[in-house]
Image (cartoon, grey):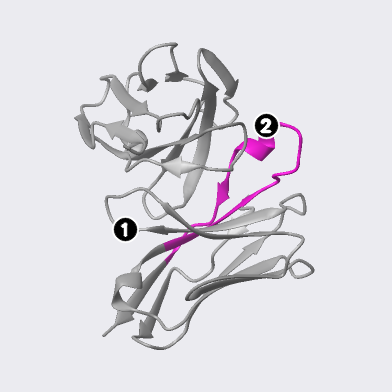
Amino acid sequence: NAGVMQNPRHLVRRRGQEARLRCSPMKGHSHVYWYRQLPEEGLKFMVYLQKENIIDESGMPKERFSAEFPKEGPSILRIQQVVRGDSAAYFCASSPSRGIDGYTFGSGTRLTVV
Amino acid sequence: DQQVKQNSPSLSVQEGRISILNCDYTNSMFDYFLWYKKYPAEGPTFLISISSIKDKNEDGRFTVFLNKSAKHLSLHIVPSQPGDSAVYFCAASPREMNNNAGNMLTFGGGTRLMVKP
């Protein structure tokens, strides 16, 4: 009865490298949401996905960031050519249906760009 | 443009006393409000919620009050316990809106609660 699984828990990347963050939703959940928490701030919505579809990416930076949720496997948040300002905690949440009912968060991936 | 604000970054309370955490919002489309608790290196965990059709919701030691006219909500914890020490986030959603906005939460910046034994 695992919850939302995110890995890795910690990720260190040098400037210019790529970062890949993975999120496996709770069993029975087919809706995935990514949030970013910058130091000393609240969580900010980035993107909402269902299997094979991006539903809402209004919070995603226009460049370097992309997300996918394939038919098989976890959801991936990909950050290309990372910069120091990308250092943050990235949280994934999942829900069984559209909307915020049953929203459950994972433990997050802390990305550090050196 | 912060639509949800928690103006107190930290709060210190003696064990057994009441903790009151405050949250203000500006978007009148928000109709559902939640409080999350977050320990270091963990994700936020849901604590309690309230719909805009109510002004109070209670669950054990936790009570959330909503004042729609003032666009203000508060979380009361009584009695406070050392294990309550964590960062508390207020979040809001226009839940009944039939568009993508109802799928996301807008968070405040958090209040760090410290309960002293």
In this picture, is B16 found above or below A70? below
List the single residue furthest toward the front.
Answer: A1
Please name the residue that numbered disc 2 is placed on: B100
Tell whether A96 sits left or right of B29: left
Using the rendered view, name the quadrant where residue A13 is placed.
top left
Identified by mark 1, the residue type is Tyr
Q: Secondary structure at mark 1?
A: loop
Please name the residue that numbered disc 1 is placed on: B39
Stretch of the chain drawn in magenta: B88-111
In this picture, is A65 found above or below A12? above
Q: Residue at x 41, y 53 (%)?
A: B45
For the residues beneath circles 1 and 2, the answer to whether they share a chain is yes
Q: Position of residue A69 (x, y in %)?
A: 45, 17
Q: Residues within 10 Å of mark 2 (few under 14, many from 20)?
A: some
List the single residue furthest toward the right.
Answer: B69
Residue A3 is tagged as: none
In this picture, is A3 found above or below A25? below
In contact (CB < 8 Å): disc 1 and disc 2: no
- Asked whether residue B50 appears in the rendered view, the answer is yes
Could you tell me which chain the residue with mark 1 belongs to? B
